[in-house]
């Protein structure tokens, strides 16, 4: 056989095989099937009563103060509570910090977990723990929740959009961890810009574009033969390439286009970059994306806690309240779980610079929507929000709860390439049954 | 047992750059240690890579960009037997090497160019340290022992980067320089490690005296008003009051009242004058010997009580006693950067090994205590001694590594498994770093621009320092003049802020109620207001004195724009971190938030950018060098060769010619072919 023909044939076949195998993590056959124990998972999913088809995960980066937001202590001494007042909500007996005025009207949909506790008091480590259920180790990178979800049960909601999107997350997001690259999130750097470069350039004809794609695999023939098997990073670029090409022809690309939203809707969510991210998350969920994370940074208030609270919290308040209203109106709240998480709380005692420092001993998360009993509070801290008194909850427990709300087996073991066992709910995470609807 | 006495341990004194002989012998010994171990462990080394793989790798690994077609061609065509060694020695002396190394240190140290004015100073200082090849131990010592205003000592930027977060700073310090993860012990005893919360606090207490305060301001104000109003003993003269002598008593009382009034006036004046220095505390460090670190309120172990003051103690190695309170940071810096420090030398030696070959001999660069054991412990020791013998000369140390046989081998076919030591049968295959892809594009479009330094950053910093010195040397009269101008500017600024804040509220209301016309009007007014404010700021009615003092008095001093367009500069010349959405940020360039946050993970937006983004379009635009050169070539053979040399650093093989010549018959088809090459893995990865 002529070597050039052989080159052609091989490249065509490998190209087709790659394309067929990839649909953003919807890997149904080939090498990937071996690491997905489908029978076991299917059974577990059938048994569960999960209601959350989608998750919108709002992450407050930097460590959001708990005592000024979800766990106010109006009766604590001044040097703890500071000038922020507690306000009533639409549920008798549940109070929030005064900057969460709009959120207070949605308490009936929310479950506040006030008994969060972890041992991770540094940003990177805390962030990692909350996102992955594991503590940060140098020997392995654990997958984040969205990747877990698609690993345990491949999303079939939309075949052309990625099942997991992150918005405004930084460089340190653990993403797919040790899972294969096809479970990695699609990162959107700026919600307003949406997904850029998703259209073929005008000067490039469709025929040229197709030729270019075919040429790429021909050029990479030898490289692929040598490295694809042994190098995850090489497989990742092939995955992403095929995904990108597929995405370009998706009918749902407009999901990323915020200009399709009315002025009123934009105004309701707010004008901050975060507000746009939250609005984008709703559009994505509407179009079948399963897990969307949106980050809001800048919560590390070592000084001037109260000035910063006044600046920052209304941004969260407005976008979050708008999201819940919007989801409810569109009938999406029954199938969408909305989470607010952060790496740790802040020291309840205010320091000399009017600041609060890192505090993993007690902090608060919030859940709302699908699969969750609204109008509830789970767990309790002492009179100064310094110690968890009842129902101590670890990030692993919390993540196991998310898994259950999604109908996923939080304790199904997946082995890493180094043959170590890992679970979505961490080593010992247990779902909080009493708040699951 | 050690098999051979490493060449490096033979006694000799190092002064000048190491001779070629020493470099090559040391490199050879590294290979010998490796080969001996590999033989024992039955690991087969990869064969030596071909010339095109070598030239591409050398340019990317040493100077951070692809070779140009000419550079590749001249290397490939040379018959010189020493051409590989010569290429390494040439590249290591070239400006591109400094560009790449600067990116590396800045990522590790989290340099933010525009975080306060001190960020700019630190950036410029570090750039110069790399430029002049300052020994690594001196560089680190300068940062860890830094004190004073950053205008006097820009290395203070290292602490100022983490203003108000000393506890975080110290855990980064030992992670970066000693490979120790102690972050957990900030709140509790480390669960996997030996570090206790007490040890954490003992270490952190070396920094306890650190204050973010500019002492020089007080001195200068004292000089202007002639008295130190901060002094406790403010009253002078008077003496004992004689109540018997009524007249004298009255006189004395009047004098005292006068003195008191005078003192109050001066105190007010001092307060007023302090506006000149109001932003200097953001850019200065000082040391308060009286300040101590106390255990946190929730301290739960028996070895200490909550609120107890803690004496400083080293994290490992010899113990220290009676640290003079005024010298705590200096003592810490001495310990941290000492040749005898258990980790300082080997951590950097291992880091630079990973910089060269893609993975550490000790795999967990930042966490030695929890790292899997290296396969070659003897190599770890040898590299440590090499680092010491070069006297922490990073350039020479890297030169040794580049001269090894290992650097010439083909890359390993399999990647290292996270959590396991790697056998180094060859270097690691890696994706180009974000800056390397960008800088290669820039080079393709504009040719070799490694020399294009962004002098604007240094000039801006020099201007700031000059302005600072002018203020510090100003006469009392000048200081008063500067103060008046600063007060006025401050008033203007506040008024401007208030007005814009009000307008923004109005704007939001208008937006919410959908008054399109009103939104437009307010936007227009806002723009006018901004224009007015900035014009006033620029022109104003400034005297020579206020003009000279302007930079030093400003809240933040923004560097000037470079005379080169960004597309004619290496990434290292651009203020960092690069903003979200830029090419470098999209491809995983460091966000400067945590040490070494740069990554090379694949994402869909990256691919979309290569497929449809402006960078590829610019590259293929006829105005650029690359497209121009290709379009001038007459035959498909020439075009194919040019494309292969430019993007793959190789001539096309016979098979490739047969396969691809039909693809470059016309110019449009050549364009599609070049696009395909740019998205290919063979382009994106470094073999």
Image (cartoon, coloured by chain):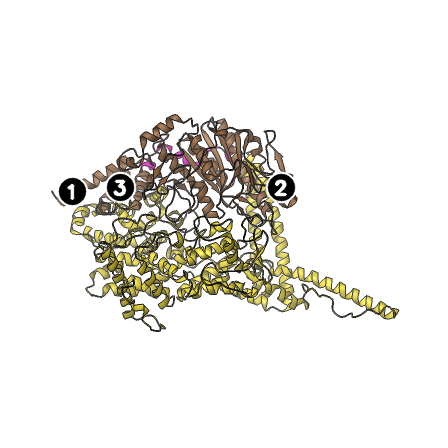
Chain colours: A brown, B yellow
Tell me where residue A252 sits by quadrant: top left
Which circle's residue, 2 or 3, is located before the other in the chain?
Answer: 2
SS at mark 1?
helix
Is residue A287 found left or right of A111 in the rendered image?
left
Residue A134 in the image: state x and y as whole percent: 42, 42
Residue A135 in the image: state x and y as whole percent: 43, 44
Which circle's residue, 1 or 2, is located before the other in the chain?
Answer: 1
Q: Which residue is drawn at 62% across and 35% down?
A: A87
Question: Which residues are the magenta region?
Answer: A245-271
Kindly report which numbered mark, 1 or 2, lies closer to the viewer in this rendering.
2
Chain of the residue under label 1: A
Q: Disc 2 designates what residue? A: A84
Q: Disc 1 designates what residue? A: A6
Q: Is residue B77 magenta?
A: no
Image quadrant where one finds the N terminus of chain B? bottom left
Q: Is residue B671 visible?
A: yes
Kindly report which numbered mark, 2 or 3, lies closer to the viewer in this rendering.
2
Q: Disc 3 designates what residue? A: A213
Query: Distance of mark 2 from mark 3, alpha carbons?
Result: 58 Å
Is residue B677 found left or right of A338 in the rendered image?
left
Which circle's residue, 1 or 3, is located before the other in the chain?
Answer: 1
Residue farthest front in this picture: B302
């Amino acid at each position: 056989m002529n070597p050039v023909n052989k080159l052609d044939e091989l490249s065509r076949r490998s190209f087709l095989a790659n394309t067929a195998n990839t649909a953003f993590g919807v890997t149904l056959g080939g090498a990937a099937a071996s690491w997905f124990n489908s029978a076991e998972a299917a059974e577990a999913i059938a048994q569960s009563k999960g209601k959350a088809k989608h998750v919108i995960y709002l992450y407050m980066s930097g460590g959001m103060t708990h005592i000024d937001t979800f766990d106010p202590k109006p009766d604590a001494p001044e040097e703890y509570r500071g000038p922020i007042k507690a306000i009533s909500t639409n549920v008798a007996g549940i109070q929030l910090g005064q900057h969460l005025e709009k959120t207070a009207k949605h308490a009936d949909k929310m479950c506040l977990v006030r008994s969060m506790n972890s041992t991770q008091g540094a940003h990177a480590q805390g962030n990692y723990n909350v996102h992955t259920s594991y503590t940060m180790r140098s020997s392995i990178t654990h997958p984040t929740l969205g990747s877990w979800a698609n690993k345990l049960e491949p999303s079939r909601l939309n075949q052309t959009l990625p099942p997991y999107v992150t918005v405004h997350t930084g460089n340190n997001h653990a993403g797919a961890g040790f899972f294969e690259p096809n479970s990695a999130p699609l990162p959107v750097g700026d919600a307003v810009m949406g997904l850029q470069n998703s259209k073929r350039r005008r000067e490039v004809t469709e025929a040229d574009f197709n030729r270019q794609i075919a040429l790429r695999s021909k050029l990479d023939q030898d490289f692929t033969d040598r490295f694809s098997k042994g190098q995850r990073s090489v497989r990742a670029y092939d995955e992403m390439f095929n995904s990108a090409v597929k995405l370009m022809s998706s009918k749902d690309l407009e999901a990323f286009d915020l200009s399709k939203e009315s002025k009123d809707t934009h105004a309701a969510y707010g004008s901050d970059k975060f507000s746009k991210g939250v609005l984008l998350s709703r559009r994505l969920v509407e179009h079948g994306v399963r897990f969307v994370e949106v980050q809001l940074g800048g919560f590390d208030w070592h000084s001037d806690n109260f000035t910063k609270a006044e600046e920052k919290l209304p941004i969260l308040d407005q976008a979050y309240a708008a999201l819940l209203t919007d989801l409810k109106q569109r009938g999406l709240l029954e199938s969408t779980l909305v989470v607010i998480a952060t790496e740790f709380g802040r020291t309840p005692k205010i320091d000399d610079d009017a600041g609060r420092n890192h505090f993993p001993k007690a902090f608060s998360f919030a859940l709302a929507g699908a699969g969750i009993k609204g109008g509830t509070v789970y767990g309790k801290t002492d009179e100064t929000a310094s110690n968890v008194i009842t129902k101590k909850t670890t990030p692993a427990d919390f993540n196991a709860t998310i898994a259950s709300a999604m109908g996923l087996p939080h304790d199904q073991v997946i082995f890493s390439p180094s043959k170590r066992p890992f679970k979505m709910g961490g080593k010992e995470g247990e779902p909080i049954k009493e708040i699951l609807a | 047992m050690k098999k051979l006495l490493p060449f490096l341990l033979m006694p000799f004194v190092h002064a000048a750059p190491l001779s070629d002989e020493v470099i090559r012998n040391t490199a050879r010994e590294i290979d010998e240690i490796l080969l001996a171990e590999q033989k024992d462990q039955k690991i087969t080394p990869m064969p030596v890579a071909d010339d095109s793989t070598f030239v591409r790798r050398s340019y990317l690994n040493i100077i951070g960009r692809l070779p140009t077609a000419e550079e590749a061609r001249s290397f490939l065509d040379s018959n010189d037997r020493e051409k590989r060694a010569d290429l390494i020695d040439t590249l290591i002396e070239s400006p591109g090497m400094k560009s790449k190394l600067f990116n590396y240190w800045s990522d590790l140290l989290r340099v933010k160019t525009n975080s306060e004015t001190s960020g700019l100073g630190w950036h410029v200082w570090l750039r110069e340290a790399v430029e002049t090849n300052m020994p690594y131990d001196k560089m680190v010592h300068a940062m860890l022992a830094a004190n004073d205003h950053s205008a006097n000592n820009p290395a203070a930027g290292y602490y100022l980067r983490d203003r108000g977060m000393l506890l975080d700073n110290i855990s980064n310090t030992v992670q970066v320089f000693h490979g120790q993860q102690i972050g957990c012990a900030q709140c509790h005893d480390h669960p996997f490690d030996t570090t206790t919360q007490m040890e954490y606090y003992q270490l952190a207490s070396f920094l306890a005296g650190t204050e973010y305060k500019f002492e020089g301001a007080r001195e200068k104000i004292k000089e202007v008003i002639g008295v130190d109003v901060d002094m406790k003993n403010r009253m002078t003269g008077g003496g004992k009051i004689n109540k018997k002598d009524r007249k004298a008593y009255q006189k004395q009382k009047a004098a005292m009242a006068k003195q008191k009034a005078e003192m109050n006036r001066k105190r007010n004046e001092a307060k007023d004058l302090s506006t000149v220095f109001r932003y200097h505390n953001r850019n200065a460090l000082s040391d308060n010997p009286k300040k101590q670190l106390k255990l946190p309120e929730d301290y739960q172990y028996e070895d200490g009580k909550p609120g107890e003051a803690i004496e400083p103690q080293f994290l490992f190695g010899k113990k220290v006693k009676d640290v003079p309170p005024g010298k705590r940071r200096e003592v810490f810096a001495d310990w941290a950067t000492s040749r005898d420090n258990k980790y300082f030398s080997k951590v950097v030696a291992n880091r630079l090994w990973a910089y060269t070959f893609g993975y550490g001999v000790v795999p967990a660069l930042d966490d030695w205590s929890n790292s899997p054991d290296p396969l070659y412990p003897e190599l770890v020791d040898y590299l440590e001694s090499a680092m010491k013998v070069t006297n922490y000369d990073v350039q020479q140390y890297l030169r040794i590594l580049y001269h090894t046989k290992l650097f010439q081998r083909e890359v390993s076919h399999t990647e290292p498994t996270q959590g396991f030591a790697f056998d180094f049968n060859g270097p690691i295959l890696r994706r180009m770093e974000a800056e390397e892809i960008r800088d290669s594009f820039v080079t393709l479009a504009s040719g070799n621009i490694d020399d294009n330094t962004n002098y604007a950053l240094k000039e801006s910093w020099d201007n700031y320092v000059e302005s600072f010195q002018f203020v510090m040397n100003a006469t009392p009269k000048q200081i008063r003049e500067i103060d008046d101008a600063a007060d006025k500017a401050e008033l203007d600024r506040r008024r401007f802020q208030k007005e814009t804040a009000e307008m923004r509220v109005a704007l939001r209301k208008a937006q919410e109620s959908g008054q399109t016309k009103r939104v437009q009007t307010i936007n227009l007014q806002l723009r006018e207001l901004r224009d007015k404010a900035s014009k006033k700021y620029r022109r104003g009615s400034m005297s020579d004195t206020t003009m000279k003092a302007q930079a030093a008095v400003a809240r933040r001093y923004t560097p000037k724009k470079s005379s080169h367009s960004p597309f004619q500069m290496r990434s290292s010349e651009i203020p960092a971190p690069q903003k979200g959405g830029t090419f470098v940020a999209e491809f995983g360039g460091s966000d400067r938030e945590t040490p070494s946050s740069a990554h090379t993970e694949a994402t869909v937006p990256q691919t979309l950018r290569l497929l449809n983004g402006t960078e590829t379009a610019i590259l293929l635009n006829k105005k650029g060098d690359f497209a121009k050169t290709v379009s001038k070539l007459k035959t498909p053979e020439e075009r194919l060769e040019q494309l292969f040399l430019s993007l793959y650093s190789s001539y096309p093989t016979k098979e490739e010619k047969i396969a691809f010549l039909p693809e470059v018959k016309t110019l449009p088809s050549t364009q599609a072919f070049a696009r395909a090459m740019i998205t290919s893995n063979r382009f994106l990865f470094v073999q």
